[in-house]
Image (tube, rainbow, N blue to C red):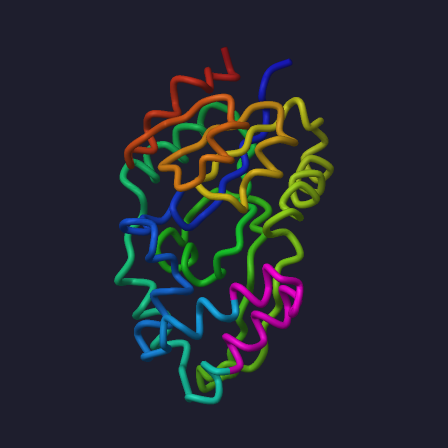
Amino acid sequence: MPIKLICFDVDGTLLDDGDGSLNIWQHIHRSIGVPEELNEQRFEMFMAGEITYPQWMDMDVGDWRKQGITKEHLISVAKELNLMPGTRETVNELHNRGYKLAIISGSINFGIETLYPDHPFEPVLLNRIYFDDEGNISSWKATPFDLQEKQAGLDLVCQIHSVTRDESAFIGDNFNDVEAAVAAGFSISFNSKSENLDAVADVKLPGKDLRQMLEFFPDLRL
């Protein structure tokens, strides 16, 4: 059954995360001097089931709001990051070849919106931050589709585009992409930091040139 839908992770897949320790969350924390120990503590609390995913986001973004972090600052931080090499060429070519494209990620909306505002992804499932007219953080909403729940995100995107799981593909780079990679009909471990993801993915692509994946997705118009 041919693939018709391709879903992407963001940090480390569409956005370059350096050596793997520079996703947009970490980059923002570092820009305002949040201690690495605090980040690690909250991650461990979440993994131990002591806090929920929305509570984790409440802690992080709540701290940003208390410090008066504005939309202008957050966008300036996003601009310090880069799209993964080949992102625009790859995504635009896949779109031209007739594929439906979507995002399922634990990243934050203004990252991809800032660096790739004309993207063709629909829907875009990730964490969202909202601002008032003065550019202050007014509210936020945690995605329900990260970590183990990316599989549920994949199911929703498949439903939106009227395709089956077998007709979907997932591209990711880390441990939180495993469930979606298992559920999809085809998966690529790209720029991987996870042996578990490598073990379940159909293809492993090392390096940081996203154009490598084009060979696996023939033109649907032919």
- Determine the residue positioned at 62% across, 29% down: 184
Residue 132 relative to residue 75: left or right: right
Query: How far from the left and from the top, in percent, is residue 60?
Result: 50, 75
Residue nearest the observer in this picture, 187 or 78: 187
Task: Say which quarter of the image contains residue 31.
Answer: bottom left
Query: Relative to 63, does residue 80 appear above or below in the rendering?
Result: above
Query: How far from the left and from the top, in percent, is residue 62?
Result: 53, 81
Question: Start and end of the magenta stretch?
Answer: 43-62
Q: What's the magenta bit mostly, secondary-structure-wise?
A: helix
For the image, the number of numbered tags is 0
Residue 70 relative to residue 53: left or right: left
Query: Relative to 19, does residue 130 appear above or below in the rendering?
Result: below
Query: How far from the left and from the top, in percent, is residue 18?
Result: 27, 51
- Determine the residue positioned at 50% across, 40% down: 8
Residue nearest the observer in this picture, 100 or 125: 125
Q: Quadrant of the N terminus?
A: top right
- Determine the residue positioned at 41% across, 49% down: 118
Query: How far from the left and from the top, in percent, is residue 57?
Result: 56, 70
Q: Is residue 60 magenta?
A: yes
Task: Say which quarter of the image contains residue 55.
Answer: bottom right
Query: Relative to 201, does residue 122 appear above or below in the rendering?
Result: below
Task: Say which quarter of the image contains residue 216.
Answer: top left
